[in-house]
Structures are given as structure tokens and as C-alpha cells.
Amino acid sequence: MSGLIGRKIGMTSIFDENGKNIPCTVIEAGPCVVTQVRTKGVDGYEALQLGFDDKNEKHSTKAAVGHFAKAGTVAKKKVVEFQDFATEQKLGDVINVSIFEEGEFVDVQGVSKGKGFQGVVKRHGFGGVGQATHGQHNRLRAPGSVGASSYPSRVFKGMRMAGRMGGDNVKVQNLRVLKVVADKNLLVIKGCVPGHNNSYVIIQK
């Protein structure tokens, strides 16, 4: 599956030919350097390791500097492997946004925004006191009843309760590519993608 590593720039909206306003996300996709070529004989599987976003050598380990030097590039901040890449590449090749075409569909993967410790209304969509759901009586945003009586005398695993929300690895599938700005390495994708602005995302064809 071909793909690139990118950085989420932010959201905007554009108008289509019918005058409809379409929300979209702008992603800086690549250029990415092939930093390692996995082969079946050596590694047991075939894949391309791509590196994105230069890293200061002062902040890199000697092992990382040596690894990237084999590909003729500086150390990278983000490294991702792509299996079953559509085209054959060799060590040191640079892959840019031109592998994508306008109108095709892609999958975008990223880490969603972390929201910290949240209650059941925000985290699971409980109704709160207005709808008086889940056994609660007079507390606005409480979870209400969570366990049975003498049997089974415990709270079942998987019960929806308050807790840490966000910061999860999320993939959004079948997003349409609206524009490819090759000279600036930009992709304009319909809809929203996970993560905050300037976070790394993985775009797969």
C-alpha cells in the first residue's frame, strides 16, 4: 500500500463547481526519503521505511545518524514503514506528493487530540439530568447506577465510565483528495483528519 508521512496544517473550506462549500483539511505530505528497504531474504517481509521532517543531529543518537547516513540524508523525526508499496524504490529515493491524484480516495491515520480525564457525558454521550438516563436522580452529569445488587456484586468489565479520553491512534478511511499542490507538497483532503495542527499523519492510498 503506497503512502506518505505528512503534517496536518489545519482546516479550511473551498467551493466546488456547483457552489457548495466543502470543509477540508490541508496536509503537508512529504517529501519523504526511503531510509531502508526491507526484503524477504533479510527481514522476512517486504516494506519501505520512509523518513520525514529533518531532525537536528545534535538531538539524534549516533546509531540514528549512521542509519540515515546510509540513505544519504540527515536524521528524521518521523519514520514509518509501508508494506506492498506500489512502485519499486531504492535506498535514498525521494517520494513526494505527486504519487497522489485529484479525485482518488485515501486513508489518513493520526493520533487524536488528547482531552484528559472526562466524564461520561462528554466521553460516552450520556444524556445527563435533562434526560434522566442511566438511573441518576439529582446529579447533573453523573453516570448513575453502575452495578447490580447482591448478584453479581461487582461492576462488569467494559462498563462505560469516566476516564482518559483522546490520544488514541485513529484511522479515517475513504477521504477524497480535492487538490494536489505539487510545488508546495500540499494535499487538500475532504473532511477532517485526526490530530491537532502540526501533528504527524500517515496518508495511504
Image (cartoon, rainbow, N blue to C red):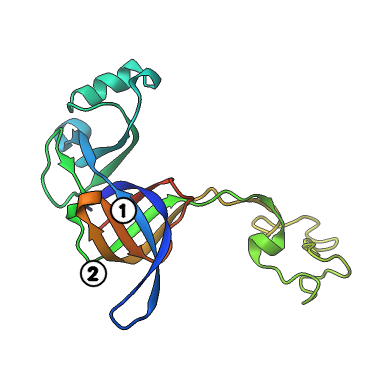
Q: Amino acid at mark 2?
A: Gly
Residue 137, percent across and down? 87, 70
**162 relative to 130 in the view: left or right:** left
Residue on which the image places disc 1:
203
Question: What residue is shown at x 34% (from left), y 28% (from top)?
Answer: 55
**157 relative to 112 in the view: left or right:** right
- Tell me, for residue 176, which label it has, or none: none
Query: Looking at this view, is 138 or 78 the one in front?
Result: 78
Q: Is residue 53 visible?
A: yes
Residue 204, percent across and down? 28, 55
Question: What residue is shown at x 16% (from left), y 37% (from top)?
Answer: 40
Q: Are marks 1 and 2 in contact (CB under 8 Å)?
A: no
Q: Earlier in the sequence, mark 1 or mark 2?
A: 2
Q: CA distance from mark 1 to mark 2?
A: 15 Å
Q: Is residue 45 visible?
A: no
- Answer above or below: position of 121 versus 133: above
- Answer above or below: position of 133 versus 28: below
Question: What residue is shown at x 43% (from left), y 62% (from top)?
Answer: 192
**Picture quadrant of residue 75:** top left
Residue 161, percent across and down? 70, 57
Residue that extends furthest to the bottom in the rendered view of this protein: 18
SS label for mark 1? strand
Residue on which the image places disc 2:
103
Query: Looking at this view, is 59 or 36 the one in front?
Result: 59
- Answer above or below: position of 117 versus 105: above
Q: Amino acid at mark 1?
A: Ile
Residue 63, percent across and down? 31, 18
Residue that extends furthest to the top in the rendered view of this protein: 62
Question: What residue is shown at x 24% (from left), y 26% (from top)?
Answer: 68
**Picture quadrant of residue 150:** bottom right
